Image: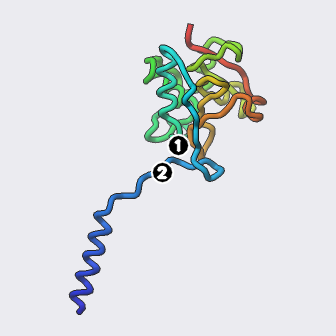
Amino acid sequence: MMRRTCAVLLILLLAACSSPPPLKQRPWSQSGRQQQYDLSHLQADGAGREILMYTLSLLDVGYQFGGSNPAAGLDCSGMVSYIYLNAVGVRLPHNAAQIANLARPIDAAELRVGDLVFFNTLNRPFSHMGIYIGDGKFVHAPHTNSVIRIDRLDNRYFAAHFEGGRTLFS
């Protein structure tokens, strides 16, 4: 009887080991629901299109302070630097203020897909940034324990901290 019990336990153990791992689910927003985005209306041409495609592919990647690649996580300037290098071959510093100094200021009404948006979130000019994706929306890596996500420029918080748009396009 003991052998039979051991055999059954061994079979159960082996069956459990051979089952496929559970599927990884996308990260959850702080509200406990998966973030859903309607992106069907976003359009861009040329470099903007390449930047948009890379940007959207990074949605829900985890935030990592100082992060410079999606596998380990990204911070705001690491995300922008990664996207610009891979989408259009432009190497940028890993620092929002330095990137702002390289880009040309533009009026918010002139923002095109792929342009950069800057915020003062740490009582310091150009302390946060994102990539404009059209329709008043931008993608950014907000903070620790969060993921890359889409927000609106007219969001109360971001509107109050908006420092302006800048472009690297001519």
Q: Where in the figure is residue 131, as x and y percent of width and height? A: 59, 25
Is residue 45 positioned above or below 83 on the image? above
Toward the viewer: 73 or 148?
148
Q: Name the residue under label 1.
A: 62
Quadrant location of the C terminus? top right
First reached walking from the N terminus: tag 2 or tag 1: 2
| Element at label 2 | loop
Toward the viewer: 75 or 23?
23
**Count of numbered badges drawn on the protein:** 2
Q: Give neighbour class at mark 2: few <14, some 14-19, many 20+ (Cα, 10 Å).
A: few
Q: Where in the figure is residue 149, as x and y percent of width and height? A: 59, 37
Numbered label attached to residue 31 = none
**Residue type (three-letter) at the residue carrying disc 1:** Gly
Residue at the farthest bottom position? 1
Q: Mark 2 points at which residue?
A: 25
Q: Measuring 72% from the left and 23% from the top, which residue is drawn there?
A: 163
